[in-house]
Image: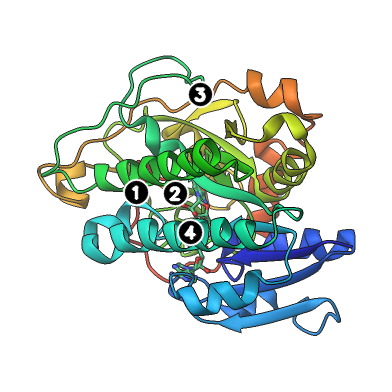
Amino acid sequence: MKKILVTGGAGFIGSHLTEALLQRGDHVTVIDDESTGAQVNLADVCRHPLFSWVSGSADDRRTIDALLDDIDEVYHLASAVGVALVASRPIEAIQRILQPNHVVLAALQQRQERLPSRPVRFFLASSSEVYGKNPSESWPEGADLIFGPTHCARWSYGASKAIDEFMALAYWRQYQLPVVIGRFFNVVGPRQRGDYGMVLPRLIDAAKRGGPLTVHDDGHQVRCFAHVRDVVAQVLQLMESPQAVGQVFNMGSDQPISILELARQVADHFTPVPAIQFQAYAEAYDADFEDVRRRVPDLSRLRATIDYRPQYDLPAIIRELVEQGTSTTDTRSTDASE
Ligand SMILES: NC(=O)c1ccc[n+]([C@@H]2O[C@H](COP(=O)([O-])OP(=O)(O)OC[C@H]3O[C@@H](n4cnc5c(N)ncnc54)[C@H](O)[C@@H]3O)[C@@H](O)[C@H]2O)c1
């Protein structure tokens, strides 16, 4: 049995990760400030004998020091999430991405000095947003990061996530802290909210209200969607792999689909079939808004490192979400983001 700390464990991905770790027989402590997540996401496991809950922020050094005392692995997911949040609350979003990451890494390094025989492996949840607007067909991990200008707030999300990666890799190089970095592409599934810029729950919610389904721009933006349980399985395998330490991995699915086709597939589940309408980015956001047209990962490195076997294709994902519902509370969103 391992002792695990999950920051941001009350969120969408963190709650699925927590369930999987408990199912594996590990002891899991979650720290979350419920800024975008909620304890209700952990309702199925909150009474599990191996589960502990800490209400608080992952940038509180004293709390983190106390939690790291007796821990084997850290999964760091606490972060501001989604381009829509960055656009509406940019200062908070940047701080929420940078500060907890640095606090946890610094605390881990100090712990390693005290207990050099018990290194703690650290997983950083990064994002495909770090590639910015790189125009390549697909992105290997070594691809250049190409951001737009700083007056365009959306790039601060990817740039801040990139700084998190630089920082984690610096701790690996300077102190041999065993870090593993996963760049999540679009992750979808139960408990994902639509109000922080997530396209699939937003489309499904709109369809449930009878439509119309709003697609931004011409709908020809391309994305790849992976089920959260498949992504969690990838994370768990990576953290078991000695080769993964000190490396960055694209994670998720590499099966591309346009947002317009995604909207059509969602609409087809409903009778009568809801209409699809188009909205310019300038209207949805602001005149400065820049999008990423194509976002497809090269998963060669992931495939070479783990046994990559996704269990869910997109039709199965949409079917599950249409049947189960989502927890979307707002309709403002973007298919530009995650
Ligand atoms: N969902 C995706 O498609 C996707 C894509 C790329 C990257 N990611 C990354 O994966 C991670 C999880 O994302 P998610 O989709 O589950 O989002 P989420 O908003 O559901 O989860 C983030 C969790 O972190 C918590 N949190 C935020 N700041 C905190 C702090 N300072 N202290 C403690 N808790 C804090 C939130 O309350 C929330 O529970 C994030 O790091 C995100 O950047 C997600």
* Residue at the (60%, 34%) spot, across then down: 246
CB under 8 Å between discs 2 and 1:
yes
CB under 8 Å between discs 4 and 1:
no
Residue 213 vs residue 25, the one in the foreground: 25
Q: In this view, does 44 lie to the left or right of 127?
A: right
Q: Which amino acid does label 3 sit on?
A: Glu
Q: In this view, does 14 lie to the left or right of 285?
A: right
> Which mark is nearer the camera, 2 or 4?
4
Q: Which amino acid does label 1 sit on?
A: Thr
| Residue indicated by mark 1 | 334
Residue 62 visible in the shown view? yes
Mark positioned earlier in the residue sequence (3 or 2): 3
Q: How far apart, in angstroms, are the residues tagged by discs 2 and 4?
A: 35 Å
Mark positioned earlier in the residue sequence (2 or 1): 2
Classify mark 3: residues with Cα within 10 Å, few (<14), some (14-19) or many (20+).
Answer: some
> Which mark is nearer the camera, 3 or 1?
3
Classify mark 1: residues with Cα within 10 Å, few (<14), some (14-19) or many (20+).
Answer: many
Residue 117 vs 175, above or below: the answer is below
Q: What residue type is labelled 4?
A: Ala
> Which mark is nearer the camera, 3 or 4?
4
Residue 16 vs residue 52, the one in the foreground: 52
| Residue indicated by mark 3 | 141
